[in-house]
Image: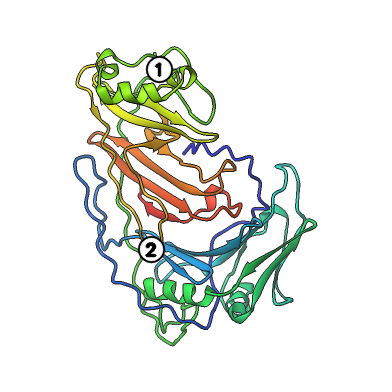
Amino acid sequence: MRMMLAASLAALTLGACGQQGGDKTEAPGAQAPAPAPTGTPGAATPANGPTMQSEVRQFRDWHAVCDNGNLCVAYSGSDATSWIRITREPGPTADAPCIGFGLGFVGHDESPGAVTLSADNRRILRTQGVDGLYCADGLAGSPVEGLIAAADANTLTLEGGGQKGVVPASGLKAALLWIDERQGRLNTTTALVRRGTGTAVPPAPALPRVVPAPAISQAGFEGAADPLEGTPRGLKLPAALEALDEVKACRAEGNPTLNQAILAARLDQSTVLWGVPCGSGAYNATYVLYLARPDGSGVRAADLPERTARTEGDIGGQDQWLVNPFYDAERRTLTVFPRGRGLGDCGTITTWTWTTGGFVLSEQRTMADCWGMNADLWPTTWRTRS
């Protein structure tokens, strides 16, 4: 999926995928996950099996995120662009967790060389170059287990490429304990923190299925906008759309250049997507989206179903004003990405898929902290399958 993430952000992005750790504070009991609501017309096909609601939690300096498929991530970092990420797949047959981390910013063609992860000056892991992702074959004796044991440390330190970063350890154990509870691993042989002799772990929840509508020619819409990659020219809003009072007010807030940056795409034989630019800043452009018939009649607001993680903090969500929308006609996906800052290393990325029943939410990922993490590594709060 084209994410319009063009990030000239090149963190020493040393991977992601796994988890483990420790902190003396135990996670409070997780709330019983509520079933994810089923959608309206155009909703994803319900999963065959149990469904879950995504959750976002914070334990001191560490965050923990589990999505609707129970894929869980624990992460922390600092505003000096240093971060550590631990991810674990759900289910009894899931692989052992992986550790990924980032340290500062480097150019796209630069190699940071060896990077060392230490806890209070005790080395846990040393990895080479930008492929510095460690996925353990098993927990026993692995650096993943070493990171769990280091959860009582004061600080976790990353060093490499002439840079040094410090990530707090406080909350790591609690975050991983909550993930064990969420995935049903407490007191089992696969638990990260509270390990036992049990072997019964719930299966991974099935993901809802989303089937894109058939592809359709975009002839006549080649000049449509991509807010992050340039300002298109030549497209005009249908007269019925321009005549709406809310569109007039929106256009009055813009400027001549912005007002030309119209987003448009043919969704199917009877539906065209129109995006009206309503304002912009240094790295964000705001739009309101409408649907209409090919002749410009039948204008109505675009219906974009929402599904937001349950969170103890304010990590995002969607409203009618969409930021940096981009429609990928090849994949029939509409993506919005309100950037937390120009580097594009924080914010919320939401993607809907156009189906024969309308738009369906197909993915959402979020990062509340601007720590230099590439958007491809952000935790997901909603996933589907195709």
Q: Nearer the viewer, residue 81 or 74?
A: 81
Q: Residue at x 44, y 18 (%)?
A: 260
Looking at the image, residue 374 sits to the left or right of residue 41; the answer is right
Q: Which residue is mark 1?
A: 221
Determine which quarter of the picture holds residue 136.
bottom right
Callout 1: few (<14), some (14-19), or many (20+) C-alpha neighbours within 10 Å?
some
Q: Residue at x 26, y 55 (%)?
A: 47
Is 223 rendered above or below residue 10?
above
Q: Earlier in the sequence, mark 2 or mark 1?
A: 2
Determine which quarter of the picture holds residue 357.
top left
Q: Which residue is mark 2?
A: 70
Q: Residue at x 39, y 68 (%)?
A: 91
Is 124 rendered above or below residue 290?
below
> Looking at the picture, how far across and down is residue 358, in whole percent?
25, 35
Residue 386 visible in image: no
Secondary structure found at label 2: loop
